[in-house]
Image (cartoon, rainbow, N blue to C red):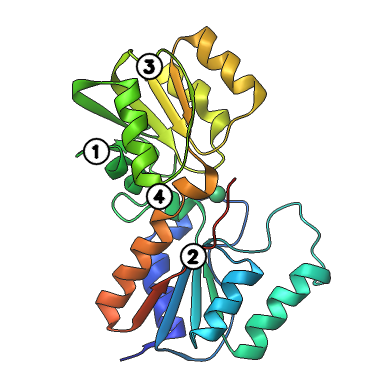
Amino acid sequence: MAVGRDELGKVLDSELCVPAFKDYCPNGLQVEGRDEINVLVSGVTACQALLESAVTLKADAVLVHHGYFWRGEDERLVGMKAQRIRTLLEAGISLFAYHLPLDCHPTLGNNAGLARAMGLREWQGIDPEDATHPVFCGVFDEGARLSDVVDRLEHELQREALVVGDPDTIIRSAAWCTGGGQAYIDDAASYGAELFITGEVSEQTVHVARERGLAFVAAGHHATERFGARSLGHWIANRFGIDHHFVDINNPA
Ligand SMILES: [Zn+2]
């Protein structure tokens, strides 16, 4: 089975509501390879190691959360960036990248994946008026000890988390944003969350958590963003009957 490259792009742009998002990079097809896709490789970041795995697996397309052409970066195709693009073009591999739309998809996205990893059954965006807001929230109906939430996350993500807060605190309301979402801790505090989870930590995040009175967990940028590309890859494989391989290039950040 196969799917046309441009058809796949249209289906994904629609499923992920791409036009609704203001993002720091183009979402969708970023590098054009051959017309038909039989084998798809998904991963978190379109780094050289992922591309080389895709070449080995004879992929026709690569699907990632972190693609190329970020706002403010050097626009020239030189050095590392030239090598990555050359690898794709020489192998005829297309690159599809979905950033914020893949964080926010209500079931396939990174935030939805992290919610499941926490054991939540229901979740939603923090702002009911804005489906593109990257912070999600949910409730532990019975209340959960912070240390139990952390244990579960560390088990699911296979990564040690950085934790701010009393381990015995009972959490009911949690908010989270996968990846580098530490600046959203203020939004989470204003929303009334007792716990905010994201991938990364900055020095000031710890003070904000202490002074605004909520627990904070940094569970890894890469670790919290492995869900979306893998889920979307499975979804594509089921829909179009193509081969799909999720390739995890380990990253401790
Ligand atoms: Zn990210």
Q: Earlier in the sequence, mark 4 or mark 3?
A: 4
Q: CA distance from mark 4 to mark 2?
A: 12 Å
| Dot 2 alpha-carbon crowd within 10 angstroms: few under 14, some 14 to 19, many 20 or more | many
Labels 1 and 3 touching (C-beta < 8 A): no
Q: Quadrant of residue 249?
A: bottom right
Q: Which residue is mark 1?
A: 119
Position of residue 150 in the picture relative to residue 181 (left or right): left
| Dot 4 alpha-carbon crowd within 10 angstroms: few under 14, some 14 to 19, many 20 or more | many
Amino acid found under the numbered disc labelled 2: Gly
Which is in the foreground here, disc 4 or disc 1?
Answer: 1
Q: CA distance from mark 1 to mark 3?
A: 18 Å
Considering depth in this image, is 252 or 66 the residue closer to the camera?
252
Quarter of the picture holding the C terminus: top right
Residue 186 drawn at (x, y percent)? 52, 21
Q: Which mark is residue 43?
A: 2
Q: Which residue is mark 4?
A: 110
| Dot 3 alpha-carbon crowd within 10 angstroms: few under 14, some 14 to 19, many 20 or more | some
Residue at the image point whose x is 62% and y is 57% from the top = 25
Residue 245 drawn at (x, y percent)? 40, 74
92 versus 68 height, above or below: below
Q: Earlier in the sequence, mark 3 or mark 2?
A: 2
